[in-house]
Image (cartoon, grey):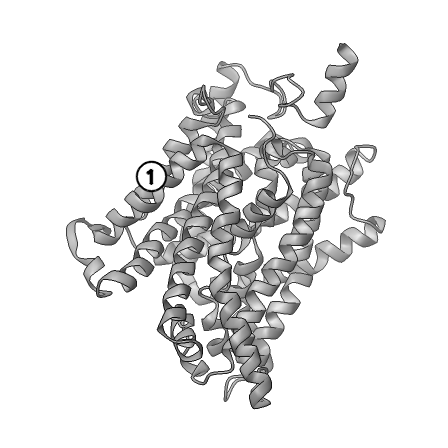
Amino acid sequence: MTRQISLLPLVGLIFFSVSGGAYSLEALISTSGPGMGILLLVVMPIIYGVPIAAITTELATAMPTEGGTYVWAQRALGNFVAFESGILRWLNSWVDMAIYPVLFASYLSTLFVPATAGHTVIASLGPFIIDVHWIVGVVCVIIPMALLNIRGARSVGDSSLLFAAIALTPLAILAVLGIVRLFVDHSNPLTPFLVEGSTAPAAFAAGLSLVMWSYCGFDRVGLIAGEIKNPTKVIPKAMLISMIVIIASYALPLIGSMAVGGWENWEAGSFGVVADQLGGKWLSVLVTVGALFAAVGLYSSLLMSNSRAIFVLAADRYTPPGLTRLSPRFGTPVVAIVVSSIIYAAFSLGSFIDLVVIDVFLINLLLLINLIALVVLRIKDPDMPRPAKIPGGWFGVALMGVPLTVVIVYVTWFTLRDYGTTAVWLLGGTLVLSVAAYFPANRYRQRHGAIDSATDGLSKDPDRATPRETENFVEQA
């Protein structure tokens, strides 16, 4: 796979790996209150989003190759932790990716048919239900985005810029109209600060999981680092730009929406109602179209990074090597993309609400592995070139890592408390199965010729190699 992704396409990919815009964040205001909701959107990047981005940037620029957490954990913590991080990320994507095709179909149905029509059941087998929404999701999202991903990173990156423009334009119009009305009416969008009858700690806790979800995903850059042009310079710039865009895309539409009443009843999808009140039916339709493209952009970007997770496991012979097969025309991991897409289509057949707790837990577990890998590598390999090293020595690492760890531990406890025994069994079962899978996978690896790391065995073509490999190539020449 060649380095095809430049700065702006990478910004688009990061935007959709993390955000997609403020769509579905309306519930934050009705849950925590206007003031607390906006405060969370501003504070959480400091204690959660920025540390993830900083840790990822240091590791991805030090080891700019495919694999992300897998490669970082392998070098710092060994093969077992690396395998667990790779397989858990891919398994986690089965649940995470299933929502976007159905979400797309739900938004589409509001434009053309009554909302209930899309849920007409065609066939069912237990929790798996084939309805119109599922067919629309497969035909309009899963198949086209698989084909787009097979065309290559450049196609995915360039399309992400287009999708981002379409997704953000309606929210920008809504924000401008709303903020102008706030000034004209001399209204304070941050009042009341809390939901009536709530306390500050309760309101903070109620909105924390949703906002945390809205700022995770920066670490996915590591999964595609081997396809980024000049990664040591481009990744830090893209992280900074995308962070600013994401914060603005969250806060400004919500602030503008406070110009109309009824925030107490907001839920996911309420931007359409707000848009209708601020601009009329035309803006409401634009917001729905924006949400459609946000769902598509999220799916396409995440398919690209998630397919690389199983690709690097196959490259290290933990899974059948057929998953490493590249398209002869585009040089993309075509088998990994197709297999992942089929699994996502299958999972989008069902409603697995209880599995959401696995999604949240595993994302945060992977983030903690990234932090541990960074600390271990600072100790084990202090001379490793780190073009975008977190400044301030160990104090800087603590400044990034301690708040991140505290908020992850708190949210994990909070989530397990709410989901109860079911969550504990689901999480325990997932972790036990992933650990059990390591032993046959490792035996398979040993029998079929292991590669020492995911960076070994890469082409020595300078356009395909990492900077360190390029230096070796030049020296040998």
Counting the numbered discs, the total is 1
Q: Look at the image and tell me in which quarter the C terminus lies.
A: top right
Quadrant of residue 36 within the rendered picture: bottom right
Sort mark 1 into few (<14), some (14-19) or many (20+) by Cα contacts within 10 Å.
some
- Residue 472 lies, with reference to residue 18, above or below; the image says above
- Residue 423 place in picture, x, y as percent: 42, 57
What residue sits 46% from the left and 52% below the top? 359
- Residue 138 place in picture, x, y as percent: 29, 44
Nearest the eye: 402 or 36: 36
- Residue 269 place in picture, x, y as percent: 39, 68
Nearest the eye: 290 or 76: 290
What residue sits 42% from the left and 63% below the top? 419
What residue sits 51% from the left and 20% below the top? 445
What residue sits 56% from the left and 76% below the top? 255
Q: Amino acid at mark 1?
A: Ile
Q: Residue furthest left?
A: 122
Query: From the viewer's perspective, is 427 left or right of 53?
Result: left
Query: From the viewer's perspective, is 368 left or right of 421?
Result: right
Residue under label 1: 143
Quadrant of residue 437 within the rendered picture: top left
Residue 400 visible somewhere in the drawing: yes
Q: Look at the image and tell me in which quarter the N terminus lies.
A: top right
Residue 193 visible somewhere in the drawing: no
Quadrant of residue 34 within the rendered picture: bottom right
Q: Secondary structure at mark 1?
A: helix
Q: Residue furthest top?
A: 477
- Residue 148 lies, with reference to residue 219, above or below; the image says above
- Residue 160 place in picture, x, y as percent: 50, 46
